[in-house]
Image: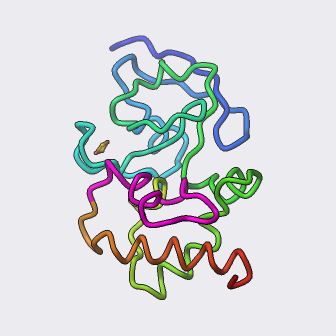
Amino acid sequence: MAKKHHVTTTVNGDECDFLCEPQQTLLDCLRDELMLSGTKEGCATGDCGACTVMVDGVMVCSCLVLGVEVDGANIDTIEGMPRTMNSTAAAPFPGAQRPAMRDLHAGHSDCRPRTARAQSRPDRDRNRYWLAGNLCRCTGYDKIIRSVQAAAKEMRGNA
Ligand code: FES
């Protein structure tokens, strides 16, 4: 049995630590050790984007990162996005995005981490840029893009 490593990190603004096997991915650590199930596993090979999280402000596929690699890092998952994203000028989602996604039938959780990075005044090209690397398996991309734009409009007071 492999020796477990002690990892200390910040997840969604909260300091935390966990034990993980050397080969355990960040995705598995988030889901199995920290019980943050918002990050999904799709392909487990870095192709679908379902496992996207932010590590020190950089978007990564958590299935391709080892848990031991994030020791000392700041991690943002979809669970923390309403708090972390609302605190910046850059993206007020997904708090306002959820009703828009529901209303436009664009509700698939795997895409939210990437669409949540959209700007507060998004245009279609910027939305598509942030959605790149996420393979949608249920809704199709246009509904997601429209929901991001609708949420941004709502956040601006329909201006
Ligand atoms: Fe990580 Fe698909 S599960 S990219």
What's the coloring here? rainbow
**Residue 125 at what x, y percent from top left?**
42, 60
What residue is shown at x 37% (from left), y 77% (from top)? Answer: 143
Point out the stretch of residues depicted in magenta: 115-135
| x and y, in percent, of residue 112 in the image | 47, 61
Question: Left or right of 85: which side holds 39?
Answer: left
The image quarter in which residue 94 lies: bottom right
Residue 85 percent across, percent down from the top left? 67, 54
- The answer to which of 77 and 113 lies nearer the viewer is 113
Looking at the image, residue 117 lies above or below residue 21: below
Q: Nearer the viewer, residue 68 or 74?
A: 74
Image quarter of the C terminus: bottom right
Residue at 22 percent across and 46 percent down: it is 43
Q: How many marks?
A: 0
| 24 to 108, vertically: above or below | above
Looking at the picture, how far across and down is residue 82, in whole percent? 67, 60
| Image quarter hosting the N terminus | top left
Ligand 1 visible in quadrant: top left
Does the magenta-highlighted stretch encompass residue 127? Answer: yes
Judged from this view, the residue extending furthest toward the bottom is 103
Relative side of 26 to 133, left or right: right
Residue lying at the far top in this picture: please name it: 3
Vertical relation: 36 (above or below) 8: below
Q: In the rendered view, would you say 120 is above or below 14?
A: below
Q: Which residue shows up at 32% across the image and 53% down it? A: 134
Image quadrant in which you'd find residue 25: top left
Q: Is residue 48 magenta?
A: no
